Amino acid sequence: MWRNHFTCDILAENGSAHIESLCKWGPTTFSHRTRVLPSGKPPEDTETLVQADPTWQLEYDDFLQRCSSGVGTNIDNDQLIEKHLTSMAAQAMELTL
């Protein structure tokens, strides 16, 4: 796309949550919908956040702290995260079959 765009939709039994865009590309919108049984239009709560991208400063501050203290990263932690993400992806694929 010519413009970066991010969406995340989490669907659950009693409602859903939706994120549109990220702060670094403009306003971020979070919407929460509550399921109406047996049917009907769900009520929706929406919040819009407008701010500069907060992640880069946090990452940079962490990097500087690690450099000054001599504490590096731990590849074991990265490998553990990758293992869990791979496992969750495999489980998700099994549910779709």
Image (tube, helix red, strand yellow):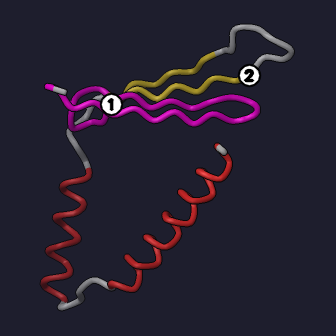
Residue 4 is a magenta residue: yes
Callout 1 amino acid: Ser
Task: Where is residue 41? Give x, y as percent.
Answer: 69, 8
Q: Is 69 above or below relative to 6?
A: below
Residue placed under numbered mark 1 in the picture: 21
User: For residue 36, what is the image quadrant?
Assistant: top right
Q: Which residues are magenta?
A: 2-27
Q: Residue at x 66, y 45 (%)?
A: 97
Callout 2 amino acid: Arg
Q: 59 or 10: nearer the eye?
A: 10
**Taking 76 as reference, is 9 left or right?**
right
Q: Which mark is residue 96?
A: none
Residue placed under numbered mark 2 in the picture: 35
Specify few, some or many for label 1: CA neighbours under 10 Å numbering under 14, 14-19, or 20 or more. Answer: some
**Earlier sequence position, callout 2 versus callout 1:** 1
Task: Where is residue 82? Give x, y as percent.
Answer: 43, 70
Task: Where is residue 71? Give x, y as percent.
Answer: 24, 89
**Taking 27 as reference, is 77 left or right?**
right
**Taking 52 as reference, is 32 left or right?**
right
Secondary structure of the residue carrying numbered label 2: loop
Secondary structure of the residue carrying numbered label 1: loop
Measure the C-alpha gap from mark 2 to mark 1.
24 Å
Q: 9 or 28: nearer the eye?
A: 9
**Taking 63 as reference, is 90 left or right?**
right
Assign the N terminus to one quadrant of the image.
top left
Q: Residue at x 19, y 54 (%)?
A: 56
User: For residue 68, what is the image quadrant?
Assistant: bottom left
Q: Is 77 above or below relative to 69?
A: above
Q: Is 40 above or below relative to 49?
A: above
Task: Where is residue 83? Give x, y as percent.
Answer: 49, 73
Outermost residue, right side? 38
Specify few, some or many for label 2: CA neighbours under 10 Å numbering under 14, 14-19, or 20 or more. Answer: some
